[in-house]
Image (cartoon, helix red, strand yellow):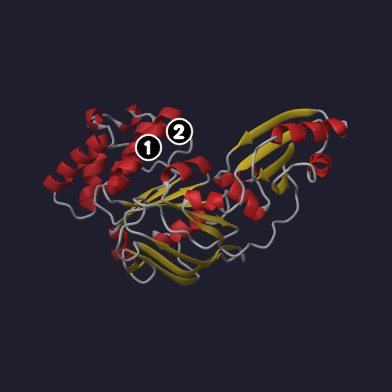
């Protein structure tokens, strides 16, 4: 990928209506931010003037590369980071003005395992419930219910050392929702998990959403955001670039086909050959090992690329054709590949 500085952030794309049955529940915003900003003492502006409205009962994804400002945003929403400017309300509570009250309505699953290794699986949940004011009997009842919900009912008496990474992640989700928070924050919930554990976490997220739980999902995984989120906010360099349903965001690139092409020449030379020879070309981006084309209409696409390369004396290594993804959207907005940042 080219090493040029990122272009100025474009204005956020207009938000499209949510698809029927996904994130369309009525009521005041579960999370609302206005002008939310964080500037660190060294002058780094991690988040700039963020305006968001997250609906009750939806899965809302904050998608962006590492360093985009996702974790700082969530830190402000969950009271661990003090905003420099702006306002954030969670379940109607100003998190900066009333942090203790706000924390009672928040559940957080952090990136790092914070389970108490001196307690058993069930004891971790009971202790959490007592901390949030549940009576002992209620805490135990809720612990058992939540363990069953995440498929750990048979592991209630186990020590923490007996849990796999995937089991520990499911336990942290159970702990985070034990006190019935208004909003659940999941910070990169599947990072480092094996495929089976990843699917298990995804299924739990879907079940919680079906039960009405509002979920804020922080991720750099485009496929995860696409599969789980009702709406996605794409952010980079602390700024909101686009907001909408996954389907609406993918439509915004005005293309129905994405083609990644690699060859035995440098990407700039390959781009120069293909730029005027591909029918329906909407956009072209240089990647580290080739070019990525967004195209409207896939008819004769493979032939056009092959013939253009042959006439220029270029040997193609690979042509990969697929549908637009959230990765395509990010590339379209920034000129950068999210996966390489």
User: Residue 288: horizontal and vertical position, in percent?
Assistant: 73, 40
**Which secondary structure, mark 2?**
loop
For image coordinates 72% across by 35% down, the residue present is: 261
For image coordinates 68% across by 37% down, the residue present is: 260
Q: Which residue is mark 2?
A: 193
Alpha carbon separation for disc pair 2 and 1:
9 Å
Image quarter hosting the N terminus: top right
- Labels 2 & 1 near each other (Cβ < 8 A): yes
**Which secondary structure, mark 1?**
helix
User: Residue 239: horizontal and vertical position, in percent?
Assistant: 57, 62
* Viewer-closest of 217 and 172: 217
> Is 196 left or right of 138, judged from the image as shown?
right
User: Residue 104: horizontal and vertical position, in percent?
Assistant: 28, 59
Write down the quadrant of residue 197 in the picture: top left
Write down the quadrant of residue 315 in the picture: top right
Q: Residue furthest front?
A: 299
- Residue 120 appearing in the image: no
Tell me if residue 194 comes above or below residue 149 in the rendering.
above
């Amino acid at each position: 990928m080219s090493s040029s500085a990122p272009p100025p952030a474009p204005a956020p794309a207009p938000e499209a209506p949510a698809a029927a049955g996904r994130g369309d529940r009525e009521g005041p915003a579960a999370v609302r931010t206005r002008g939310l900003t964080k500037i660190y003492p060294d002058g780094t502006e991690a988040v700039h003037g963020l305006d968001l409205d997250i609906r009750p009962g939806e899965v809302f994804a904050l998608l962006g590369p590492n360093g985009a400002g996702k974790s700082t945003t969530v830190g402000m929403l969950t009271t661990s980071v003090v905003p420099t400017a702006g306002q954030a309300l969670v379940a109607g509570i100003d998190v900066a003005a009333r942090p203790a009250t706000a924390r009672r309505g928040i559940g957080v699953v952090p990136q790092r395992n914070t389970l108490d290794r001196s307690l058993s699986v069930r004891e971790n949940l009971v202790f959490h419930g007592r901390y949030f004011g549940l009576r002992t009997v209620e805490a135990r009842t809720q612990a058992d219910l939540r363990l069953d919900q995440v498929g750990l009912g048979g592991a209630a008496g186990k020590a923490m050392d007996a849990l796999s990474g995937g089991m520990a992640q499911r336990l942290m989700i159970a702990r985070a929702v034990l006190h019935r928070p208004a909003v659940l924050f999941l910070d990169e919930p599947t990072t480092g998990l094996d495929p089976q554990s990843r699917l298990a976490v995804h299924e739990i997220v879907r079940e919680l959403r079906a039960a009405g739980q509002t979920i804020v999902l922080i991720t750099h995984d485009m496929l995860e955001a696409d599969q789980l989120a009702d709406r996605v906010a794409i952010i980079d360099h602390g700024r909101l670039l686009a907001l909408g349903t996954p389907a609406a965001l993918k439509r915004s690139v005005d293309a129905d086909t994405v083609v990644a092409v690699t060859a035995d020449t440098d990407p700039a030379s390959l781009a120069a050959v293909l730029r005027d020879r591909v029918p329906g070309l909407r956009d072209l981006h240089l990647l580290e090992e080739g070019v990525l084309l967004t195209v409207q209409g896939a008819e004769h696409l493979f032939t056009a690329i092959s013939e253009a390369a042959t006439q220029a004396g270029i040997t193609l290594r690979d042509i990969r054709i697929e549908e637009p993804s959230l990765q395509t959207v990010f590339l379209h907005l920034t000129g950068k590949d999210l996966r390489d940042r």
